[in-house]
Image: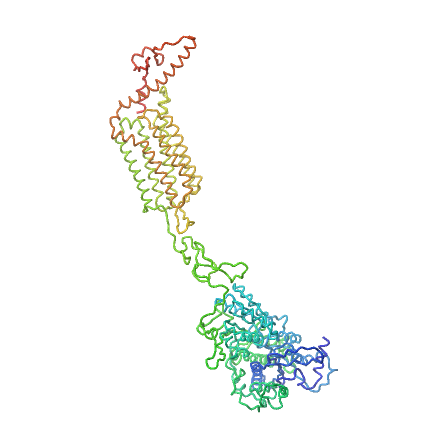
Amino acid sequence: MRLVLYYLTLLSSSCVISTYGPHQRAQMTGDILLGGLFPIHFGVTSKGQDLAARPQSTECVRFNFRGFRWLQAMIFAIEEINNSSTLLPNITLGYRIFDTCNTVSKALEATLSFVAQNKIDSLNLDEFCNCTDHIPSTIAVVGAAGSAVSTAVANLLGLFYIPQISYASSSRLLSNKNQYKSFMRTIPTDEYQATAMADIIEYFEWNWVIAVASDDDYGRPGIEKFENEMEERDICIHLNELISQYFEEHEIRALADRIENSTAKVIVVFASGPDIEPLIKEMVRRNITDRTWLASEAWASSSLIAKQEYIDIVAGTIGFVLKAGTIPGFKEFLQQVQPKRDSHNEFVREFWEETFNCYLKNSPRLQESENDTSFRPLCTGEEDITSVETPYLDFIHLRISYNAYVAVYSIAQALQDILTCTPGHGLFANNSCADIKKMEAWQVLKQLRHLNYTNTMGDKVHFDENADLAANYTIINWHRSTEDNSVLFKEIGYYNVHAKKGTRLFIDKAKILWNGHSSEVPFSNCSEDCEPGTRKGIIESMPTCCFECTECSDGEYSNHRDASVCIKCPNNSWSTGNHTFCFLKEIEFLSWTEPFGIALTICAVLGVVLTTFVLAVFVKYRNTPIVKATNRELSYVLLFSLICCFSSSLIFIGEPQDWTCRLRQPAFGISFVLCISCILVKTNRVLLVFEAKIPTSLHRKWWGLNLQFLLVFVFTFVQVMICVVWLYNAPPSSYRNYDIDEIIFITCNEGSMMALGFLIGYTCFLAAICFFFAFKSRKLPENFTEAKYITFSMLIFFIVWISFIPAYFSTYGKFVSAVEVIAILASSFGLLACIFFTKVYIILFKPSRNTIEQVRCRTAAHAFKEAAKATLKHGAVSRKRSNSIAGSSASSPSSSISLKTNGRDSESSSRPRVSLASGTVTLSLSFEESRRSSIM
């Protein structure tokens, strides 16, 4: 710090203002002094300093015509203010403007001259200073242009709270007010520009780009923000490179090699013109013309790049520029420049020599060029500036020049606010006002932070909390002039930073010429777009922007190109063969109109008709022996239950509804239990009758009709209760099964498979008992029982329902209902045919067998057979006993066996006798009539 103070002391020890800072400058004295920093040159010579002698100041090279125009805009604004009677009356603004040469070192050299006098009094260095003339303090600085330069300048000016207003530094880092306390600007921050660039890339559907940034505080933060924006949009950056105008030639060639070998066709550049120029030259040398450039505002309208010799490479460039402003009278001011008239501006002489490619008399560059092989004639300084074409006179689109103009007027307006401040309404302690004659730079900074005014152009000027001035971008396209092959900047759209997201960008595609001649948008993607019906598939070890096209799976579709994912079809739809859209699935159920449904319906109706016919026959012939022998009352109930069984199968046909789903299983289960119960009770009753030796009163009580119906009711009631519990706890409902491709099956969700198992299991349990009784009674008279047929029908029943279980669980959709209908019909037809068809056949076609005599005869024959078996068994036992008594004596082969009933031999003469071989068997039928009457 002490060294800095001594340096400032040395600067202030001179009494001549011209000794401050670099020798070449533009200056004018005044009551209040403004500083200016402009890039009059593009750079400095890159000479190595070996320190063999005292180091010399680096020389600035390559005159910047646009930078000189920006300087002229500041001078024009100051002259306008000095000539104004309303703005700062009786106060003259002076200026000291230096060339930064687009480098930090030159800018800091000039900045030290600004702060020297400002702090000379506060440093208490009067003993070192013998100045007699008063040097005005620099109360504000306009500049610099490049963000890297402004960053260095802002660090120094911020120490002394000297306000700095930049007209072209857009780095977002400069918005940090904790670090850059006195920095302000009239250009929007790169925060918006990086977003705008990403929006353009997304707009043109590019996903594979190259990013190039200057290796400074402008390029690095800008490209970092751009990377974040690209990542949010899933857009890939293939190459991310840094560049500088001071790169060695081999570094530029290596960078050009990487760009040439890249498949990305869009190059995004966050750099200034001087930094990007070496790369453009190398691209021109290689004739790489198939690239599209996206330019930041730092070089989007740079005259250094927009040259005829570069047009083949840069034609079609999309660039961001600031909204152009208008400065009345500025055109004439630019045209009036002359070396003799503008002696206060030392840059005019060099500008004149560079414009007319000549040397002025007594020019220092004339002496320096004696060793130069190039020849330049002398010029008078009175040449017509309008007769040459130069970027200096490009006043059609004033952007940076307008920003510099606004910066000067902002400082002047802040001074005007100080001048017109009313005590008690000021911005300082106790609402006091600053004294315009004794004010300091920090007071101007305070006033600038609260600035809010409308300039003569009608634009509102107000610095936000980050000391940034809000603005919008104009988007331009570099066209090739058909006349002289020069670059033309055509406006093709704009970017409104204040609009809602998604509506900020507007581009007129019809105005764009890609690569200078084509209207087709260039392709800059890692992979070709995927056609509709496909999606992007990830390629291992490659960025997400590089993909392979994978066909959508069945049931998914994509209806646009380059789809990231396939969209799953709704449940009621399915994808087409090419997976480009979905069609509605076909709805299927066991319909009344389909052939299978019609066939099942016919079978069910046929079963109802046949059963009804049998019932009608039984009713008509109800008093015949066969009908009486089959227990006609239970037969009626049995036939009714069979009608219900056939009818219940019809509920399974048709579109399932909630009510049909809840009705069909209970209807089927209850009908079958009623049927099986009737068969069980009837079979068991006949078996008990014929197995009883004496018909006691207890037998007659159990064989009564009321008890038979009570048993049927009890058996059926159990099934009813199973159904009630099922319907209460887990009622079945209609269900749409979407799991099958291209088809929606409407089925019934049974609610509880356990309940269904109980329902069928209970029915099978009763059938098993019935089968047992039927098997035992298989030898009873045919007139009284259908034992053999019932046994066969029960076998059919078991075969059907045992087969039903695996079939039911292995089928799906409408076939589930079909399987159950087939099982119901098969078992119902089996019962109907086995039990009743033989009876109907005898009743209708063999009436001779349907008589009381036939019934009695068959009953007697059955009794004879049973009695004979019993007698033979008894005789065998007796012979065994006789043999044991007689010892070795043999029994007579002729003997007479007499069977006595109840110990009464006297009644044997009145009973039928049957001769068996050599003996006679006497059978007792004393209770035949009572049995027959009870059965009939």
Quadrant for residue 470, please give it: bottom right
The spot of residue 567 in percent (x, y) is 45, 57
The spot of residue 99 in percent (x, y) is 62, 81
Closer-to-camera residue (140/481): 481
Q: Is residue 539 above or below residue 447?
A: above
Closer-to-camera residue (45/800): 45
Evaluate whether residue 699 shows in this view: yes
Closer-to-camera residue (38/408): 38
Q: Is residue 345 above or below residue 251?
A: below
Q: Is residue 700 above or below residue 559?
A: above
Tell me: 564 left or right of 375: left
Q: Is residue 151 above or below residue 689?
A: below
The spot of residue 165 in percent (x, y) is 59, 77
Evaluate whether residue 424 shows in this view: no
Q: Quadrant of the N terminus?
A: bottom right
The spot of residue 412 in percent (x, y) is 58, 81
Tell me: 8 left or right of 519: right
